[in-house]
Every structure is written in structure tokens, then in C-alpha cells.
Image: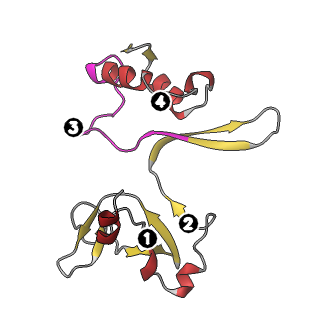
Amino acid sequence: MKWKDILKGKGERHFYIENGKPVQWTGETHKHPDGTLMSGKEHKEGVSKKLLHFYELDERHLKHLSKETTVIKFKRRFKKVVRNKKTGRTKTVKYGQAGKAKDGKDRIRPGTSKGDAYCARSNKIKGNWRSDPNSPNNLSRKKWKCHGNKSRR
């Protein structure tokens, strides 16, 4: 990131206020005709939220701003609760893109050309996801019924 980008405000975190606490917004943004920064690519009445930069937050909102209270919401389609056998602790693994496909049908369609493309793409992801059966990539590949670079019915 260049200094010019920082001066223009690119790369800054955006927040909206929910129940009196700031929540970080990570999605698309647009400018309202009056110059207000809003959530979403286009304005939708009742859906778009007013966004604030960090320096625009009030004192009462800043006191809630910490690693624990700043919630970053990522919409995921599936979740699986996994229990560590050694420690007994549980964690929730969220995976899969939320929503339906453009034609309104299910997004996950094993055995199709889209399935083959997904399996080939996800197979190239680096890291040790292959050794962890509960990694989001492994769980998604299982839903798509991936075997190597191919998706089977």
C-alpha cells in the first residue's frame, strides 16, 4: 500500500453500529448522494448501513472496540462443531459460500463442470489442509465430492 492510498482513505477499516457496539464491515461500499459512506455495492433502502471510519467513532463506541468486542461477520453456509480429543475443547468450523447460485438452484452441484472447476481450484490451495480432516477446504471438498481434480456424482 502506498502513502497516497492511505491519504485517500483506502485500506481503512469501516464500522457500523449495532446494539451500541461497533461492528467491522468487510464487504462492498458505496457513497450515498449526500456523501455518506454506506454498506453494499448499491443503495438498498432498509438494508444499507451507514459506515464510519475509526476516527469518526464516538467515545462510547471506542470503549467497546477491542479484539474481543469487534465482531467481523463472515457469512458461511455450513458449520461443524469439532471437539479436540486431547484437550476436550470444542471449536466451530464455518465453511462454504452462503446463498444460492444465480439461477436460484443449489450452489453445490457435484459431478458438473462447475464442480470439476472447484475441485481443481481447491486442490491447488497451499498449506497443510490435507492433513486436517476438519479444515474448511477439506469439508467443502467433501460436499462437492471431490476426488483429486474431479467432482463425482
Residue 103's tag is: 3
First in sequence: mark 4 vs mark 3 = 3
Nearer to us of marks 4 and 3 is 4
Return the mark for residue 140: 4
Q: Residue at x 29, y 70 (%)?
A: 8
Among numbered discs 3 and 2, the one appearing first in the sequence: 2
Q: Give the image location of residue 29, x and y in percent.
A: 29, 64
Q: Residue furthest left?
A: 33
**CA distance separating discs 3 and 2:** 35 Å
Amino acid at circle 1 = Phe
Residue corresponding to mark 1: 15
Q: CA distance from mark 4 to mark 3?
A: 21 Å
Q: Position of residue 117 (x, y in %)?
A: 31, 22
Q: Residue furthest front?
A: 3
The earlier-in-sequence mark between 1 and 2 is: 1
Residue ID at (57%, 73%): 65
Q: Earlier in the sequence, mark 4 or mark 1?
A: 1
**Tag nearer the camera, 1 or 3:** 1
Which residue is tagged 2? Answer: 70
Residue 107 included in the magenta stretch of the image: yes
Cα separation between marks 1 and 2: 9 Å
Magenta highlight: main SS: loop
Quadrant in the rendering for residue 122: top left
Check whether the beta carbons of the residues at disc 4 and disc 2 lie within 8 A of each other: no
Marks 2 and 1: in contact by CB < 8 Å?
yes
